[in-house]
Amino acid sequence: MADIAGIRRQFIRTAMEAPFLARDEERGLAVRWKDKRDERALHGLIEAHMRLVIAIAGRFRHYGLPMADLIQEGHVGLMEAAARFEPDREVRFSTYATWWIRASIQDYILRNWSIVRGGTSSAQKTLFFNLRRLRARLMQSTEEHVGDEIHRRIATAIGVSREDVALMDARLSGPDMSLNAPVGEESEASSERMDFLVDGAALPDEAVSAQVDGERRLTWLNEALAVLSERELRILKERRLAEDQATLEALGSRLGISKERVRQIENRALEKLRRALAERFPQTAGNVYA
């Protein structure tokens, strides 16, 4: 660990001692890298701007992530900026690189600050990185410290819903909790948070019983359907058993009869089916097809 800390200090010292680049020097290096893929030019451009990475990373140190990791991610953003930079646009490389460095660090924080993924939209990302600052400023400028009022003002300032502000505020107010964390005093006999999760699925014996009962009822129904004529069976299937049930008018048009006649045949088929089920399987008398 001591060696790692020493390497880190040496890296920061080297970055801070790198000379600043004049505008012409900066542009010359950028042109050589873009046009000739001169790696020495890229190295010079990156080395001169590492202090910018360190400065930007320092602004995000209060999120509890290692400073070395923030600098490393900022370096990734700096490399991305170098790859995309257009020297002909007459913009300083530091101005262009600042956005990429900050974006890379922010993405890293969002991925690693919590095991629960958040900030997937630009509005949520803005909310994540500005909520604390806005809340502190609003609480200093107003005597109304009521949570709902503060959330409403922040939502208006950022352009998100009050519910989103309240949810993000709750996430930032506490760390992640493990489902294996003990509840109450820590001991071998104590319960874990996972023990209090409710499973909405049926118990194994209930699931098996429901499956067996379903198969039995399907067998009864298939046997009872044998008493129907071909036309009665077709009407009943299309009117009651199909996923997309046909209308009386549409079915009558296909069969060449009126919709009233279709209704009569359907009712007669249902009555025949009820009688067949009641006669063959008396146990279904109180729960027959309707």
Image (cartoon, helix red, strand yellow):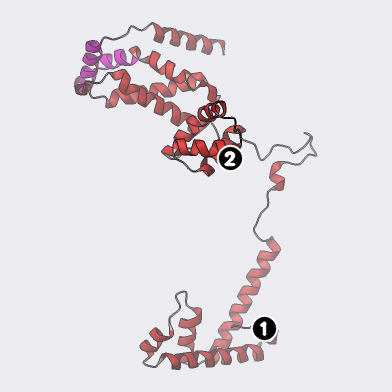
Instruction: Tell me where the magenta segment starts and ends, as one range.
Output: 21-46
Identity, as a three-letter code, of the amino acid under mark 2: Asp
Q: Which residue is mark 2?
A: 148
Q: Residue at x 79, y 36 (%)?
A: 188
Looking at the picture, tell me which residue is in the foreground, 61 or 40: 61
The quarter holding residue 84 reads top left
The relative height of residue 127 versus residue 242 in the rendered view (above or below) is above
Q: Residues within 10 Å of mark 1 (few under 14, many from 20)?
A: some
Q: Which residue is mark 1?
A: 284
Q: Magenta includes 27?
A: yes
The quarter holding residue 114 reads top right
Q: Main secondary structure of the magenta part?
A: helix
Across and down, in percent, residue 217 comes to 62, 78
Q: Residue 197 bears which disc, if any?
A: none
Q: Residue at x 64, y 58 (%)?
A: 201
Q: Residue at x 45, y 20 (%)?
A: 57
Could you tell me which secondary element the residue under label 1 belongs to?
helix
Looking at the picture, tell me which residue is in the foreground, 118 or 277: 118
Across and down, in percent, residue 154 comes to 50, 35
Identity, as a three-letter code, of the amino acid under mark 1: Thr
Looking at marks 2 and 1 on the same chain, the residue that comes earlier in the sequence is marked by 2
